[in-house]
Image (spheres, rainbow, N blue to C red):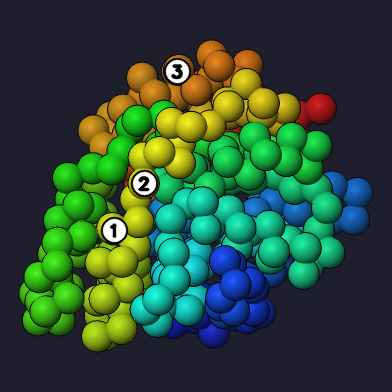
């Protein structure tokens, strides 16, 4: 599935974050009345297309929700609102309320992991299972290439140059040569004037305080750190610390960097299914 096909199957709703009404694009697929929906949360500089190969097989057994964070993908990108993980947590809370979802399992990556950790710590009775994949936590972030996007001059960068810069970041985080459709699809939303500015605002909003202030011991969900073992952006030592503090487990996937779900797709799906099915 390419990014245009993925986008064509997204739905849209409006959430309220800090008094701002913002559009959220999301994928809603599958069903399982006796199990909580599985919500997939992407990071930066990606969007829900990150999960293109993972969501369909999980949707065979469960209802899935895969939103674009505000400021990302096909959600609202205009200027003038907070894009931090604190704000994304508020977006998630309102989205779930609108969809009538009271209890979930969360599957998260990168800053989506920070969003999931905050939501699970603040709503321990609403999260059954929590999967963190190469997720930001504690003081593990931001990383250098994201801070490059936060520089003021990025908003004046020619679109062709920006495309090369963003796509190079995706290649840098991959094990070996990434699928070009994957890279093109993840890069595409940023290649407009509005997208270029939104990328800068998203990068500026990477506030480490939002994960260092968190009470990780408040998380009651079953936790699995399903991690690309060779990631230099979010080293596996953070997964080990997170698992120890939350009573969770670490599943390390070799030959996988930051985009672990793309580097080891079949194994990722297998481990995710197994964890979600555990009693």
Q: Residue at x 73, y 41 (%)?
A: 123
Residue 131 in the image, given as x and y percentages of width and height:
58, 37
Which labelled disc corresponds to residue 203? 1
Say left or right for 52 vs 180. Answer: right
**Residue that label 2 marks:** 207
Local SS, label 3: helix
> Circles 1 and 2: CB distance less than 8 Å?
no
User: Which quarter of the figure has residue 222?
Assistant: top right
Answer with mark 3 or mark 2, whichever residue precedes in sequence.
2
Residue 107 in the image, given as x and y percentages of width and height:
58, 45
Which labelled disc corresponds to residue 240? 3
User: Which quarter of the figure has residue 203?
Assistant: bottom left
Residue 227 in the image, given as x and y percentages of width and height:
43, 32
User: Which quarter of the figure has residue 11?
Assistant: bottom right
Picture layout, residue 194 above or below residue 223: below
Q: Comparing marks 1 and 3, which lies closer to the viewer?
A: 1
Q: Comparing marks 3 and 2, which lies closer to the viewer?
A: 2
Whether residue 79 is visible here, answered yes or no, is: yes
* Disc 2 packing (10 Å; few <14; some 14–19; many ≥20): some
Say left or right for 199 vs 8. Answer: left
């Amino acid at each position: 599935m390419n990014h245009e096909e993925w986008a064509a199957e997204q739905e849209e709703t409006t959430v309220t974050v800090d008094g701002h009404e913002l559009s959220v694009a999301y994928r809603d697929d599958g069903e399982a009345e006796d199990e909580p929906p599985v919500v997939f949360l992407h990071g930066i500089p990606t969007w829900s297309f990150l999960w293109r190969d993972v969501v369909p097989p999980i949707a065979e057994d469960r209802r899935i929700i895969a939103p674009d964070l505000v400021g990302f993908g096909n959600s609202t990108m205009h200027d003038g609102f907070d894009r931090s993980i604190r704000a994304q947590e508020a977006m998630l809370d309102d989205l779930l309320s609108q969809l009538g979802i009271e209890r979930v399992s969360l599957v998260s990556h990168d800053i989506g992991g920070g969003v999931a950790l905050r939501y699970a710590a603040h709503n321990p009775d609403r999260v059954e299972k929590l999967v963190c994949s190469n997720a930001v936590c504690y003081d593990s972030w931001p990383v250098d290439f994201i801070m490059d996007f936060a520089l003021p001059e990025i908003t004046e960068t020619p679109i062709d140059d920006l495309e090369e810069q963003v796509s190079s970041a995706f290649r840098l985080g991959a094990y070996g040569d990434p699928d070009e459709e994957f890279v093109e699809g993840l890069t595409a939303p940023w290649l407009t004037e509005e997208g270029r500015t939104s990328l800068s605002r998203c990068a500026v909003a990477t506030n480490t305080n939002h994960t260092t202030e968190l009470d990780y011991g408040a998380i009651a969900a079953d936790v699995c750190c399903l991690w690309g073992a060779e990631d230099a952006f979010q080293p596996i030592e953070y997964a080990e610390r997170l698992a120890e503090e939350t009573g969770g487990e670490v599943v390390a996937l070799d030959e996988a960097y930051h985009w672990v779900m793309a580097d080891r797709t079949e194994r990722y799906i297998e481990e995710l299914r197994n964890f979600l099915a555990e009693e």
